[in-house]
Image (tube, rainbow, N blue to C red):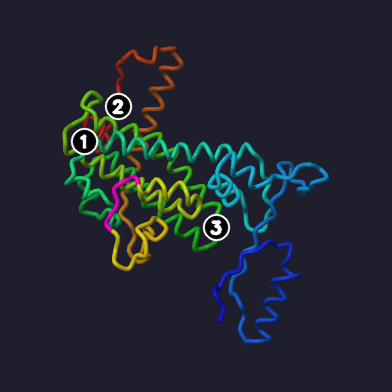
Amino acid sequence: FYPGTCLETGYDILFFWVARMAMMGLELTGKAPFDVIYLHGLVRAADGSKMSKTKGNVVDPLDTVAEYGADSLRYSLVTGVTPGQDIPLNMEKIEANRNFANKLWNCCKFVTDNALKGADEEEMKTLGVNGPIGKEEFEKLSLPERYIVSKCHSLVASVTSDIENYQLGAAGSKVYEFLWDEFADWYIEISKTRLYEGAGGGGEEEAKAARRVLVYILDTSLRLLHPYMPYVTEQLWHHIPRPSATEDQVAHALMLADWPQMDDEVPLTTSEEAVSSFESFQALTRSIRNARAEYNVEPGKRISATIVAKGSLKDEISA
């Protein structure tokens, strides 16, 4: 009996240990002990040299965890590796990933402490994520919501494919980029215009849709990020609305929750048109910001802008 089909190890012991395991397994059982050998690199100092007590460049993992957290170190090691290549480890990278964990915490705090304030008990019960957003619900959403859900569903498919093909570093980096660049920088800011009347909120239905999408994107992102940052994601998941535990679950935990895409045969709902339209809106926003900066316009001063658009994009901007 072999417990698994994949062996993960460093390339430096490929012959000394891995080859002997294979030969011994074949000799005693007639079967190979594993089908896949995933070779990671060696952790080295920031300059690429071998860590040595003599050189004084050894990074103590216990000290690093105490200062930056276990998730930051784990994420840095996993996303900083290309199969077979060594991993230069520096504190700046670990600190940056600690800041990412803080960013994730702040996103969750916004959702729980601000966005969900206006939700009543009945709505809270419906916000737990039981599965992906389907086509019917998706088509009822406004452009920003269709955009972020489309990007999230594309991320799920990409990360799932990367992990299945052992591209672990690429998968983890994609989740980072989505959470920071798309969810935090764009959608959370846009959701405020739905949630707060003073910021242009359009009514209770828009607010409910925004709360639904905020919880859905955050929940899905936590599931994708959990293999890389298990501690902070588990903690945050218990603070957002969750579906009830199933009878076959040993514990109601993110670690045992379903992966966002359980059926590879059924792709998640996306809209290329929504992504294209919203990217045009992003480019327009950046152009206006650049023009304001170029002419030293005060941040709080309102200016008029003439926008030339046609078709569905014109309708979305007008709305």
Q: Amino acid at mark 2?
A: Val
Q: Is residue 178 above or below residue 30?
A: above
Is residue 120 highlighted in magenta? no
Asked whether disc 1 touches disc 2, contact meaning CB atoms under 8 Å apart, the reply is: no
Please, what secondary structure does the residue beneath circle 3 have? Answer: loop
Q: Residue at x 29, y 67 (%)?
A: 247
Q: Tell me whether the residue at label 2 lies in contact with that at label 3, contact meaning CB atoms closer than 8 angstroms.
A: no
Between 124 and 311, the residue placed more toward the observer is 124
Report which quarter residue 146 is drawn in. top left
In this rendering, which labeled residue sits more in front, label 2 or label 3?
Answer: 3
Give how far apart the Cα atoms at labels 1 and 3 are.
41 Å
Give the residues drawn in magenta, as a range: 239-244
Q: CA distance from mark 2 to mark 3?
A: 43 Å
Residue 87 as seen in the image, left or right of residue 50: left
Which mark identifies residue 193? none
Pointer 1 with pointer 3, Cβ within 8 A: no
Q: Which residue is mark 2?
A: 308
Kindly identify which residue carries mark 3. 167
**Residue 41 x/y as whole percent:** 68, 56
User: Which one is in front, 226 or 314?
Assistant: 226
Q: Work out whether 132 lies above or below 107.
A: below
Residue 147 x, y percent position in the rendering: 32, 43
Q: Amino acid at mark 1?
A: Gly
Q: Which residue is mark 1?
A: 118
> N-terminal of the two: label 1 or label 3?
1
Main SS category, magenta section: loop
